[in-house]
Amino acid sequence: MTLGSLSHTWKKLLVFVAIIGPGIITASIDNDASGITTYSVAGARYGNMMLWTLVPTTIALVVIQEMAARMGVVTGKGLSDLIRENYGVKATFFMMIILLIANFGTTVAEFAGWAASMEVFGLSKYIMVPLGAFLIWLLVIKGSYRGVERFLLGACLLYFGYIISGVMAKPEWSKVLESTLVPEVKLESEFIMLSIAIIGTTITPWMQFYLQSSIAEKGIKKEDYKYSKLDVTVGCLMTNVVAFFIIVTCAATLFPGGVRINEAHEAAQALAPLAGKYASVFFAISLANASILGAIIVPLATAYYICEAMGWEAGINKTFKQAPQFKWIYTILIIVSSLLVLIPGIPLVLLMVLSSVLNGILLPFVLVYALSLINKKKIMGDFINTKRHNYISWATVVVLIILTVTLLIMMAVPGVI
């Protein structure tokens, strides 16, 4: 290798390092408290049987996230901005209201996951929830975009705790591989519900808004898009590798003994006698990390898209004086969500279910808007979707709509399946 080619390689590596962040952070933090609960329950209830669902889910996630990233790079605007400019304030306003309610429920779920993980270590939620809420508020309100991004990227490394737990659980790898490559279906309501939940917890409306807004704020240029695309692809693969190991861990330990769980922290507690104390600790630490990161990003995504939709200033780099609505939306979501978790007897499960239902209703609309926008040549120029990309994208949307409608029917009419 010549000196010139070596220098060129280093230059490309430095550009990639400068650009990475939005894709990896968005996808990784999608493995939040509710996501980890879904994967844990799937592994405990059905063993390795549901691993194959992660393959098509990963493909769908890469396709959808790539479109959001491309729009952010080409337009320099967030998705809310583009929807408002092209479809009017009224449609945008009602979508934002529903998203606000849905993300409020999701933020409550994140703090509930943080509280539960802390209690695994014997720490009181009445101390740890306010402390966690204050620290993440301080990070975003007083920090810079680059500083927050570096913190989030570093924290994403803790997700590897799930991989360590999976290895320590000593699964039968031949059976794991077979279940990943050979689809198997059980025609029963719980299996169908969990299949829908795996897709629904992996692809959520807030992800599209946050990814596009963060790329726009970072100011990534068209000529560097290939690095942003790699960032998105790596992030999507990372998040579903983590999901894979969560299912494998619970399949190898909880499933053989018929241990039934409803929450991720129950899986962490149950692992100790089955896979060893350290596997349980890694699982609980990773849950705490995922919950607190979700509590940072979901309110942040909410503040971004509401401010963009209303034409208000937004951005982590802005001060309270420069972007008061952005900072206040973030602050209020953090305060109210954390306080709700501290109320004895509060129906947290109801809030989480409501959040999932609202996200399920909105997701098809968000994706249809995104597909419509990305195929407008006046917006995207030469970066519109190819025919092949459109076929894959619309097929993904159709499948997601069918699954979403199925989920809503199942929730509305118990026993329908």
Image (cartoon, rainbow, N blue to C red):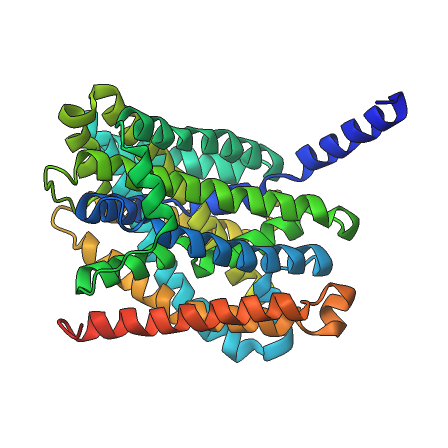
Can you say which quadrant of the picture contains the N terminus? top right
Q: Residue at x 26, y 24 (%)?
A: 279
Spot occupied by residue 331 in the image (x, y as percentages of width and height): 43, 47
Q: Residue at x 27, y 63 (%)?
A: 354
* Lateral position of residue 219 relative to residue 131, left or right: right
Of residue 272 and residue 19, the one placed in the foreground of this image is 272
Spot occupied by residue 301 in the image (x, y as percentages of width and height): 49, 53
Spot occupied by residue 8 in the image (x, y as percentages of width and height): 83, 30
Of residue 370 and residue 237, the one placed in the foreground of this image is 237
Report if residue 197 is visible in the image: yes
Spot occupied by residue 217 in the image (x, y as percentages of width and height): 65, 49
Of residue 326 and residue 290, the one placed in the foreground of this image is 290
Q: Residue at x 32, y 47 (%)?
A: 179
The image quadrant of residue 120 is: top left
* Lateral position of residue 403 relative to residue 266, left or right: right
Number of callouts: 0
* Lateral position of residue 193 relative to residue 205, left or right: left
Can you say which quadrant of the picture contains the C terminus? bottom left
Vertical placement of 408 versus 340: above or below?
below
Vertical placement of 324 versus 152: above or below?
below
* Lateral position of residue 195 relative to residue 311, left or right: left
Report if residue 143 is visible in the image: no
